């Protein structure tokens, strides 16, 4: 096993456990799904049948009838957010965008691009949206509809916003049907259906759209994503384009025609049961990592519904680069994906413990305090360890 493939991916949520040998020949074709997935365009080399197959799969997962949904395979989770928030803005042109501080930067980028008023909502120590603060902020803007980004797994802490509590807060604040919810499921959109006790993402609830990244948990070798929304919303947003002989309702023009085939292949090869097993394995392995870190005296936190283990930022940038750890301030994280095995975690842990002994051997330099990021109970700095 090469050094790079062993060590290159811990901090980023990319499932590298894939084998697409059967699809290698596809690189000889320029496959482009430009336009609307449901309306054939003039360009003949496309994979629309696979795209619609993938969309049907996700619409079933998120419980939206075939004749009631619209969606497309995006270039990435960011594009899904840009699209979902745009749909919300088209439904409520004077709506205010609400998003927790720990939302992905693409959400705030959407607000800037669309020149929307945007209100940042505080978060709990877990990284979840703080609905008490949400309620306070809603009460200041009762005259304007609310467009809300709900995180199904935040980037840094893997926190899952409580969708049910967000809906309850909106209803209790008098917003009735004057709101639009976009669920950013880039990270855990495909994991959450298989996590017991998680608030489920379903169009049976009053949500407007859901997006997920295809190269994260699904494990596609190229960046891509899935965006699903209600068909009734899309007519407001689209226009016909004669040159394409199709409808323009997507963010991008030309669209990757290979990605739907790779996604379709994986969804059918693994199926619901396959994903369920992978999710369970990731959650188990994430618990293992968190427990072992703490046994070794390293402060660490793992949200209940998540496979993202947050811990103290390693002192040495070379170590951070070698393991491709994503860091923010005093914390780093490992996102346990299906390709992250116990052996790999042991290798990582042993190396971290060994290096830490040298970083902090003289006692002058101390491990960072991470209480502000993850709570005192998860911090093992000299001040907080019992
Ligand atoms: C919560 C969340 N949303 C959106 C994105 C953006 O996804 P992508 O990298 O596929 O554009 C990410 C990426 O890490 C993310 O963590």
Image (cartoon, grey):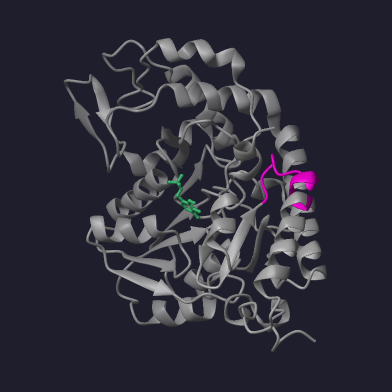
* 91 to the left or right of 294: left
Does 72 sit above or below residue 110?
above
In front here: 47 or 246?
A: 47
**Position of residue 249 measured from the top left corner of the image (x, y, whole percent):** 30, 36
Q: Which residues are magenta?
A: 336-346
**Position of residue 296 measured from the top left corner of the image (x, y, whole percent):** 80, 68
Question: Residue 23 colored magenta?
Answer: no
Does 4 sit above or below residue 369?
above
Residue 22, by quadrant, is top right
Quadrant of image for the C terminus: bottom right
Residue 315, by quadrant, is bottom right
Quadrant of image for the N terminus: top right
Does 245 sit above or below residue 376?
above
Q: What residue occupies the far left of the structure in this picture?
A: 242
Q: What residue occupies the far front of the structure in this picture?
A: 362
**Position of residue 228 measured from the top left corner of the image (x, y, whole percent):** 46, 40
* Residue at 73% across, 40% down: 278
* Residue at 61% across, 78% down: 368
In front here: 307 or 68?
A: 307
* Residue at 48% across, 67% down: 102
* 117 to the left or right of 190: left
In front here: 244 or 282?
A: 282
Residue 158 appears in the figure: no
**Position of residue 173 measured from the top left corner of the image (x, y, whole percent):** 46, 76
Residue 24 appears in the figure: yes
């Amino acid at each position: 096993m090469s050094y790079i493939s062993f060590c290159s991916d811990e901090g980023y949520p990319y499932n590298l456990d894939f084998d697409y040998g059967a699809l290698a020949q596809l690189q000889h074709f320029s496959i482009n799904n430009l336009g609307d997935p449901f309306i054939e365009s003039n360009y003949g080399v496309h994979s629309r049948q696979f795209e619609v197959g993938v969309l049907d799969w996700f619409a079933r997962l998120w419980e939206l009838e075939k004749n009631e949904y619209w969606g497309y395979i995006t270039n990435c989770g960011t594009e899904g957010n840009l699209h979902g928030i745009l749909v919300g803005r088209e439904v409520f042109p004077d709506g205010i965008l609400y998003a927790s501080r720990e939302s992905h930067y693409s959400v705030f980028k959407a607000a800037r691009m669309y020149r929307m008023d945007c209100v940042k909502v505080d978060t709990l120590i877990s990284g979840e949206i703080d609905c008490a603060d949400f309620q306070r902020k809603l009460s200041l803007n009762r005259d304007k509809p609310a467009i809300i980004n709900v995180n199904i797994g935040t980037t840094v802490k893997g926190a899952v916003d409580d969708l049910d509590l967000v809906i309850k807060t909106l209803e209790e604040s008098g917003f009735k049907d004057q709101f639009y919810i976009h669920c950013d499921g880039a990270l855990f959109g495909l994991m959450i259906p298989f996590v017991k006790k998680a608030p489920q993402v379903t169009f049976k609830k009053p949500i407007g759209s859901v997006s997920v990244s295809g190269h994260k948990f699904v494990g596609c070798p190229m960046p891509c994503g899935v965006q699903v929304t209600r068909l009734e919303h899309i007519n407001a947003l689209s226009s016909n384009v004669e040159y394409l002989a199709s409808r323009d309702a997507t963010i991008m023009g030309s669209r990757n025609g290979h990605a739907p085939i790779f996604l379709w292949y994986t969804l059918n090869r693994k199926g619901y049961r396959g994903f369920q097993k992978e999710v369970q394995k990731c959650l188990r392995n994430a618990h293992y990592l968190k427990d072992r870190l703490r046994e070794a005296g390293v402060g660490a936190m793992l949200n209940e519904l998540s496979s993202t283990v947050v811990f103290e930022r390693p002192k040495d940038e070379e170590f951070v680069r070698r393991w491709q750890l994503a860091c923010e301030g005093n914390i780093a994280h490992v996102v346990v994906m299906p390709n992250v095995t116990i052996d790999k975690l042991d290798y990582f842990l042993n190396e971290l413990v060994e290096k830490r002994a040298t970083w902090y051997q003289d006692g002058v330099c101390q491990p960072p305090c991470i209480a502000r990021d993850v709570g005192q109970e998860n911090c093992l700095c000299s001040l907080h360890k019992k």
